[in-house]
Image (cartoon, helix red, strand yellow):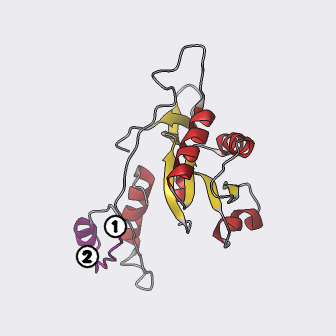
Amino acid sequence: HERSLNIDFLLGYLKQLLPKRPDLKVIITSATIDASRFSQHFNNAPVIEVSGRMFPVELRYRPVQAEEAEDDDERDLYDAIVDACDELNRIGPGDILVFLPGEREIREAAEALRKHSFSRGGAQTEILPLFARLSAEEQSRIFKPHQGRRIVLATNVAETSLTVPGIRYVVDTGLARVKRYSYRNKVEQLQVEKISQAA
């Protein structure tokens, strides 16, 4: 899905391996890849395009700290998430997907959302965290039919591997876990970093 140096090395290795293994088939999928260049690289391999559906998207940027707030009136990320979900709750029906960088943030956001009372036509709001250490049964709850509104809390990595039905609104915290190499410790680390609005 995302190009990296490791993926490029793997594709180079596969290019060398294909003449030796005619039974091996390589399928590359991506929404952003330069298909013609990759086709040429793999001896003019066929390109199959599947057109997706496009929907109008309205972007709204909300800073965590409101400009009119006083210095002693500190809001944190979880207050901003609750406010954003409350605003979307007033707009209309549909489930909400909230992107967070990791499990700890997902758990804390779930706790903050459960403490808040969402009132819209008496419909119940269900908070569904989604991260790797949950059991398969707990993870599959997001696909089951439901009444009322759901707020699904997931990482932006999960978004690349599944599609959650019923999602109408997305709240992106602007944070992600980014792999960085630590020269001091000589290891790769996943650090929480702010991402740009363009990303």
Of badges 2 and 1, the one in the foreground is: 1
Give the residues in magenta: 35-54
Give the residue pinned by disc 1.
Answer: 54
- For this orientation, the residue located farthest to the bottom is 23
Q: Residue at x 37, y 69 (%)?
A: 16
Q: Quadrant of the N terminus?
A: bottom left
Depth check, front residue: 142 or 151: 151
19 on left or right of 117: left
Residue 109 screen position, x and y as percent:
66, 42
Label 2 is placed on what type of residue? Asn
Residue 20 screen position, x and y as percent:
40, 78
51 on left or right of 9: left
- For this orientation, the residue located farthest to the front is 121
In this view, 116 is above or below 124: above
The tag on residue 43 is: 2
Label 1 is placed on what type of residue? Met
Q: CA distance from mark 2 to mark 1?
A: 32 Å
Q: Residue at x 44, y 86 (%)?
A: 23
Depth check, front residue: 110 or 184: 110
* Main SS category, magenta section: loop
Q: Residue at x 41, y 72 (%)?
A: 17
Q: Residue at x 34, y 77 (%)?
A: 50
Residue 31 screen position, x and y as percent:
35, 64
Is residue 188 at all visible to an observer of this figure?
no
Is residue 134 at all visible to an observer of this figure?
yes
The tag on residue 83 is: none
In this view, 29 is above or below 118: below
**Membership of 52 in magenta stretch:** yes
